[in-house]
Amino acid sequence: MKPIEQIVQQLAHGDFDFTRHALRRAVERNISEAEIRQMAENARAIEDYPQDKYAPSCLLLGFTKAGRPLHIQASYIESEKVRIITLYEPDPTEWNEFEKRR
């Protein structure tokens, strides 16, 4: 399994791909690949899902250069690219400082 640091580094370098679901969400939510790379520069894991349905994964929080908060759920599976499972801008009514669920 990949350590968090490796996942973040791969995101920052653009070494990622999307599940079909994540690609749809990125388009719907207007989240660009540049924003994904930017958020990875300061991303940290805020939740861990070792028993996730398809593969172990984690939820990352990071901010774009414009200050937009983003959550990315990424797989821990060892591969050349990080697999993004889903991504979104967290709703402040559901999250305390975007990192703890209310």
Image (cartoon, grey):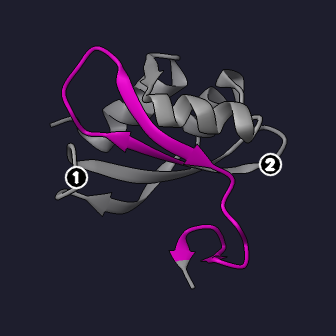
The residue that label 2 is drawn on is 67
Where 20 falls versus 97 (above or below)?
above
Q: Residue at x 73, y 72 (%)?
A: 92
Residue 53: image tag: 1
Residue lying at the far bottom of the rendered structure = 102
Q: Residue at x 44, y 16 (%)?
A: 15
Q: Nearer the viewer, mark 1 or mark 2?
A: 1
Is residue 62 shown above or below 100? above
The quarter of the displayed image where residue 4 is located:
top left
Residue drawn at (69%, 53%), measured in percent from left and top?
89
| Magenta span | 72-100
> Whole-percent x and y of residue 41?
58, 35
Q: If you read the primary sequence from the N terminus, does the residue marked by circle 1 or circle 2 appear first?
A: 1
Check if residue 97 falls in the magenta segment. yes
The location of residue 14, given as percent across then percent down, is: 52, 17
Instruction: Give residue 96's quadrant in the image.
Output: bottom right
